[in-house]
Amino acid sequence: MADLGLLTLGGTVLGGGLAVAGVHSYLSGRAQRQALVDRLADDGPPPPVGRPRRFAALDRRLRATEAGRRLERRLASTGLDLTPGEFVACTAGVAIGLWVVAAAALAAFFGPIAALVAVWAAFGYLDWQRRKRIEKFINQLPELSRILANATQAGLALRTALGMAADEMEAPAGEELAKVAARLAVGHSIDDALGELAERLPSRELVVLVTTLVLSNRAGGTVVTSLRNLTQTLEERKETRREIRTQLSQVTITAYVVPLMGVGTLLLVDRIAAGSVERMTSDFWGQAAVVVAFGLYGLGFFLIRRMSKIDV
């Protein structure tokens, strides 16, 4: 009986130890897999080390929805160090703050308008950051094409040349090429990896470069000569875009000044005759006039920006 008891105790201890080791191995493997998925995912930037994330619960709820995933991809294309939860919380806080300030400074009618303007401005800022990042990436394309041409001429494969360009170039080109190199490292084709790059940062120049690389990879040919010619063309387009932007800078400023003049006039009227804005918005026709005026200012802003937009 004593031997049977010791045998049972030993078997229990051994089974418990194996169970603990199995659970530990499972959790460790699951954590490693999740870390690999997060590192290779292109839906959003990897979380930076050292900065605690705020609004984690809200962020998890947003990521579970389609709108939240679209917002995450939108934030990823801007290069901002923000999660969807942080962006939504900050935007809501600013909107509520402007609502209170506008209602207290002018009239209660302007509170919702100020909140809507805050939300529109937040998403407009994301679009501006995205365009700025794309513009910076376009300016790096001549250097990227030159690096790829030199690496290809030296006998390196296109996959190796892309990895070398990712190490040598600064952001955003370095970060985007690092994602392409990570895709290639896990077995994705060059066509798919470069196609995803063109989708993240859409531009005519990048599409031309991607098309050149894909066709050269498929059919072979003089890729070095093509990249040399493409480098010269990208340099010329870069200078042309810079000249057009300089000539249209006054028109761009006018698009922003005109709506600000309207808001400034409204504040000036309320300062000269205290309470006039509140009395004006106390009935339907006054509110309708304010809405129509803001709509016309918004239409003017849109038309000026539309007319000053020249695609090169």
Image (cartoon, grey):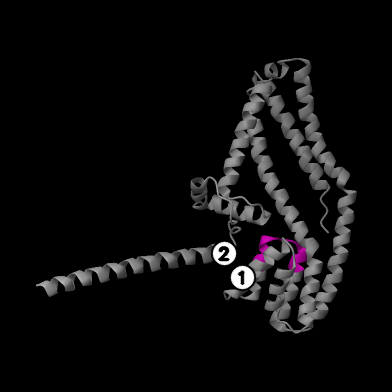
Q: Is residue 308 left or right of residue 125?
A: right
Can you give x and y, in whole percent of width and height, for residue 25 in the image? 39, 68
Looking at the image, is 261 positioned above or below residue 242? above
Residues 177 and 237: in front is 177
Q: Is residue 78 above or below residue 274?
A: below
Q: Amino acid at mark 2?
A: Arg
Residue at coordinates 78% horizontally, 83% vertically from top-left?
154
State the residue in front, 202 or 184: 184
Does residue 20 sit above or below 248 in this rendering?
Answer: below
Q: Which mark is residue 227?
A: none
Q: Tell me which numbered mark, 2 or 1, is placed earlier along the sequence.
A: 2
Q: CA distance from mark 2 to mark 1?
A: 9 Å
**Residue farthest front in this picture:** 2
Percent across and percent down for residue 127 are 70, 49
The answer to which image quadrant residue 173 occupies is bottom right
Q: Is residue 159 visible?
A: yes
**Residue sitting farthest toward the left:** 1
In the picture, the quarter occupied by the C terminus is bottom right
The amino acid on which the numbered mark 1 sits, given as a three-letter code, is: Ala
Task: Assign a secondary structure to mark 1.
Answer: helix
Magenta residues?
A: 195-208
Q: Quadrant of residue 227?
A: bottom right
Whether residues under marks 2 and 1 lie with C-beta atoms below 8 angstroms apart, the answer is yes
Residue under pointer 1: 182
> Taken as a whole, is the magenta stretch helix, strand or loop?
helix
Q: Disc 2 marks which residue?
A: 39
Judge from the rendering whether residue 214 lies leftward or rightward of residue 56; answer left or right.
right
